[in-house]
Image: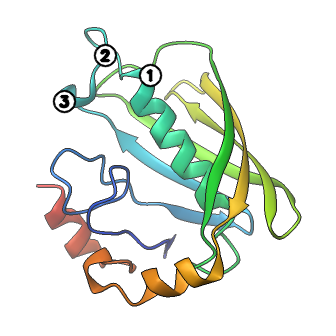
Amino acid sequence: MPDYQPNSNFCFVCGLKNEAGLKLRFENTEPGHVQVQTRVCDKHQGYPGIVHGGVVAAMLDETMGRSIMSGASDTRLMFTAKMELKYRVSVPLDTNIQVRGWVVKDKGRIAQVEGEVILPDGTVAVEGSATLVAIPTEEIARLEHNETLGWRVYTDEEYENSRT
């Protein structure tokens, strides 16, 4: 059974109630590694037939950031202080893609992560690296008590219903 991470309500990348969002579901594959399988539709296109580069950046940002939660606590939230992407080839719309992220170095308050977007034939379309910084403990505590956030692991049925 897959080891899924929590989703939220309105995040652009993982929010299940965000009508304009991607509604991605992240799976822990091993400690420090996370992946997501997705298919991006027309509403997120840049040039005709191509996923907008900013949408690709958002997917990689979230995936790399979530790698720090894999094997740790789903409340170990960090924000991206710096991110660098290398767009190698375009990411086509309506194509199954895989986005992966992993921890390179974890110093507690600061972490280095990397990630990639992979096309069905195995081509690495986009590579990324980022520096993450810990969110202050008091901010995490405030978020944990916010019911409107909707931060939890959803059942397969709940997840599928959100996508229709």
* Marks 1 and 2 in Cβ contact (< 8 Å): yes
State the CA–CA distance, disc 1 to disc 3: 13 Å
Camera-side residue: 64 or 141? 141
Q: Give the mark, 1 or 2, whose residue is nearer the N terminus.
A: 2
- Residue 68 x %, y %: 69, 64
The residue that mark 3 highlights is 43
Apparent side of residue 153 relative to residue 124 in the rendered image (left or right): left
Apparent side of residue 62 relative to residue 104 in the rendered image (left or right): left
Camera-side residue: 161 or 44? 44
Assign a secondary structure to mark 3.
Answer: helix
> Which label sits on residue 46?
2
The residue that mark 1 highlights is 53
Residue at the image point whose x is 48% and y is 51% from the top: 36
State the CA–CA distance, disc 1 to disc 2: 7 Å
Residue at the image point whose x is 64% and y is 82% from the top: 137
Can you say whether 13 is above or below 99 in the image?
below
State the CA–CA distance, disc 3 to disc 2: 9 Å
Q: Residue furthest left?
A: 164
- Residue 64 x %, y %: 63, 49
Residue 28 falls in image quadrant: bottom right
* Marks 1 and 3 in Cβ contact (< 8 Å): no
Can you say whether 156 is above or below 23 in the image?
below
Amino acid at dot 3: Lys
Amino acid at dot 1: Gly
Give the position of the C terminus as an image quadrant: bottom left
